[in-house]
Image (tube, helix red, strand yellow):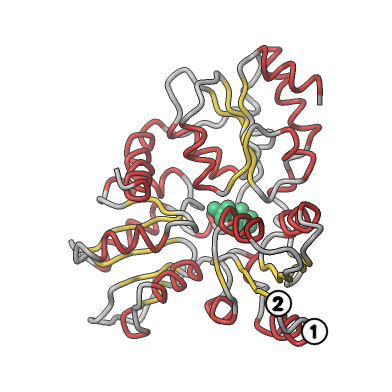
């Protein structure tokens, strides 16, 4: 720990960490957050190195927004996200050609790679995260646009529900590019999913409610719409943290999101009873550990960072940055 802190100071290194990381990583981090908070906080640092403790699409986001002199590193570049892998730019291009609608705008979830974000930026769209998907989609809906949302179906569907769209106004786009055409469509949603959140089910909520009638249920919006409908609240990891922190002593919570985060919330709030809906783990987040973080910092010290450096194809940087900045502009109402 001391060694890591010394190196951080000496080489001007910032360590952001996502809420799903283990306690050992969170304790070493300069700041912890959901994917929106992490992206914004990284833009506020002037350090030479950002060693991002999270999955690759998050580190890529930091790289896209980074200043010229900043290098972004990941302690394990294989820490990916199966959901982000569920769409590529070629599929996106093809589906836009197929739909052939100049009024269609791509809103892409942060959980996607630079080529997808760049496509969004090149087509007048924006990135969104789980904390702001409704605000971003509403911004375009108010301009009379139709929305193409990717890659998470559940987040897209939960957002459409929040905006009051009906079943007949929503079209699911299958990963083989097939869909049922509908002239009333206002939102097209790609059929991707997160394996960590997909396993939450209404039965788990029913069981908890039966045992603890006064329980509050809070879930991440990557959970199924049925699960969200049965919950008291759905929000990003940062919003979940805030809800628990602001809740009264003695309150009881059932939480539907990644288990490392739920366990930390339980430890940090001993005056409340906190239960996971199910212990569901993101194995990609757990690839980042203290030993790998130490090796990454040693690589900075030795000047051999290539194994850890997050690189983004230069053709994607500007349009992906435009889509990320558009999100920040809409959220911060600048
Ligand atoms: P948050 O932005 O809510 O932290 O979500 C990121 C994520 O990957 C959830 O699976
Ligand atoms: Fe991807 Fe799900 Fe892990 Fe989030 S929790 S990084 S969406 S696999």
The answer to whether the residue labelled 2 contacts the one labelled 1, judged by CB atoms less than 8 Å apart, is: yes
Q: Nearer the viewer, residue 222 or 284?
A: 222
Q: Which residue is mark 2?
A: 215
Element under label 1? helix
- Name above or below for residue 55 compared with residue 221: above
Instruction: Locate residue 318 relative to residue 268 in the image: left or right.
Output: left
Q: Residue 125 location in percent, x, y?
A: 30, 52
Residue 307: % across, % down? 65, 27
Looking at the picture, tell me which residue is in the foreground, 4 or 289.
Answer: 4
Question: Residue 332's x, y, as percent?
Answer: 36, 46
Above or below: residue 54 compared with residue 253: above
Left or right placement of residue 317 versus residue 195 in this view: left
Residue 125 seen in the current view: yes
Compared with 60, 127 (above or below) is below
In depth, the one of 169 and 86 nearer the eye is 169
Q: Which residue is mark 1?
A: 211
Residue at (33, 85) in percent of width and height: 168
Nearest to the observer: residue 145 or residue 131:
131
Name which residue lies at 26% across and 68% down.
99
State the CA–CA distance, disc 2 to disc 1.
9 Å
The x, y position of residue 20, in whole percent, is 68, 51
Q: Is residue 236 above or below residue 114?
A: below
Q: Secondary structure at mark 2?
A: loop
């Amino acid at each position: 720990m001391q060694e890591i802190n010394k190196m951080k100071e000496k080489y001007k290194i910032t360590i952001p960490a996502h809420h799903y990381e283990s306690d050992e990583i969170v304790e070493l981090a300069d700041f912890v957050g959901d994917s929106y908070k992490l992206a914004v906080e990284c833009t506020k640092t002037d350090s030479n190195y950002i060693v991002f403790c999270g999955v690759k699409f998050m580190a890529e986001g930091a790289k896209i927004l980074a200043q010229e002199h900043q290098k972004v590193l990941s302690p394990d570049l294989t820490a990916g996200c199966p959901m982000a892998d569920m769409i590529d730019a070629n599929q996106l291009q093809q589906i836009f050609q197929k739909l052939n609608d100049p009024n269609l705008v791509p809103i892409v979830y942060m959980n996607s790679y630079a080529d997808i974000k760049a496509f969004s930026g090149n087509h007048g769209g924006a990135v969104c995260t789980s904390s702001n998907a409704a605000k971003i989609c509403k911004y375009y809906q108010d301009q009379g646009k139709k929305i193409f949302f990717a890659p998470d179906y559940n987040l897209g569907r939960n957002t459409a529900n929040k905006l009051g769209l009906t079943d007949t106004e929503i079209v699911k786009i299958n990963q083989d590019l097939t869909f049922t055409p509908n002239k009333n469509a206002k939102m097209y949603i790609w059929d991707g999913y997160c394996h960590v959140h997909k396993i939450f089910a209404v039965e788990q909520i029913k069981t908890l409610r039966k045992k603890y009638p006064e329980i509050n249920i809070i879930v991440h919006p990557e959970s199924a719409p049925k699960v969200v409908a049965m919950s008291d609240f759905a929000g990003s990891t940062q919003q979940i943290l805030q809800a628990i922190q602001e809740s009264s002593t003695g309150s009881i919570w059932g939480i539907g999101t990644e288990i490392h985060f739920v366990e930390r919330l339980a430890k940090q709030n001993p005056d409340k009873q906190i239960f996971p809906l199910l212990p569901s783990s993101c194995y990609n987040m757990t690839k980042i550990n203290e030993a790998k973080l130490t090796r990454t910092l040693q690589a900075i010290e030795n000047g051999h960072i290539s194994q850890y450096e997050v690189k983004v194809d230069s053709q994607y940087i500007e349009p992906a940055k435009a889509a990320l900045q558009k999100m920040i502009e809409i959220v911060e109402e600048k």
